[in-house]
Image: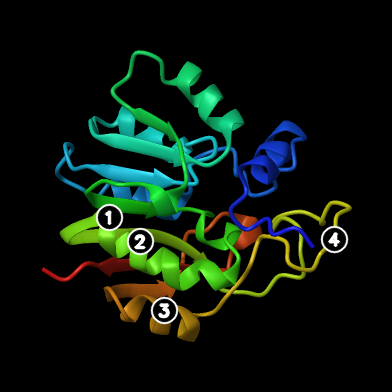
Amino acid sequence: MTDNRNDPDYWNERWLTGDTGWDMGGVSPPLQHYFQQLTHKDLPILIPGCGNAYEAAWLLDNGFTDITLLDIAEQPTRLLREKFAGSPIKILTADFFQHQGQYHLIVEQTFFCSLDPTLRPAYAEKAHDLLRPGGRLAGLLFDRDFTGGPPDRPPVCRPKAHQPPYGGHKAEYQKLFGKNLTLKTLAPCYNSIKPRAGKELFFIAVRPV
């Protein structure tokens, strides 16, 4: 089987065919609540696997000035360049694992679950490398297993094995992120959208100073 783990053509095809079941249509309530607690509006923020970037729109509307969006697929980044034309948001069509930069915050929202689990250690290491000392990786992780297909609706007709999204559980995440980062929070979400209620964990992992 073709390895789709980090293939731009695979993800671009899913965007072009509308196979984007992860798309919530708006900013995630747990992330919005977290953003509302941030006091420094100029901190550098990276959103990998940004998709439609609802989080970026909220941040921009609320005065944040240093936002970088990254997606491996051309289709969403092309649309985002139109959407955010004239704004200070930086939009990159690029591979997260090849990206270079330094950020105070990396936002995780359905990017981690799109990666084959064999890439998870590399994800944690790359997040560490992209964060400034004291910087944070924060966002949402699924607390459930999947048999294939999008998390909030019946799977489309494609092979279920070895296809995203990929689930996981708290003990796995503790081991994964505890190797390179310091986990400050890893707890069930109390304010998930209804289809994901009881199936999400909110986490904050910090690069040690």
| Closer to the camera in the image, 21 or 160 | 160
Left or right placement of residue 197 versus residue 40 in this view: right
Q: Give the Cα distance between marks 1 and 2.
A: 6 Å
Q: Which residue is mark 4?
A: 159
* Dot 3 crowding, Cα within 10 Å, few <14, some 14–19, many 20+: some
State the image quarter where residue 174 is shown.
bottom left
Q: Which mark is residue 176?
A: 3
Q: Earlier in the sequence, mark 1 or mark 3?
A: 1
Q: Are there few (<14), some (14-19), or many (20+) residues within 10 Å of tag 1? A: many
* Residue 142: image location, x then y, percent: 56, 67
| Residue type pointed to by label 4 | Pro
Which residue occupies the foreground of this view, 50 or 197? 50
Q: CA distance from mark 1 to mark 3?
A: 17 Å
Q: Amino acid at mark 3?
A: Leu
Mark 4 residue element: loop
Q: Give whichever of discs 3 and 2 has the lower sequence position.
A: 2
Mark 2 or mark 4, earlier in chain = 2
| Label 1 with label 4: CB-CB less than 8 Å | no
Residue 176 appears anywhere in the view = yes
Residue at horizontal 71%, vertical 70%?
A: 146
| Marks 1 and 3 close (CB-CB < 8 Å) | no
Distance from the alpha carbon under mark 2 to that under mark 4: 29 Å
First-in-chain label (3 vs 4):
4
Q: Is residue 193 depicted above or below 80 in this figure?
A: below
Kindly identify which residue carries mark 2.
126
Give the SS element for disc 2: helix
Residue denoted by label 1:
130
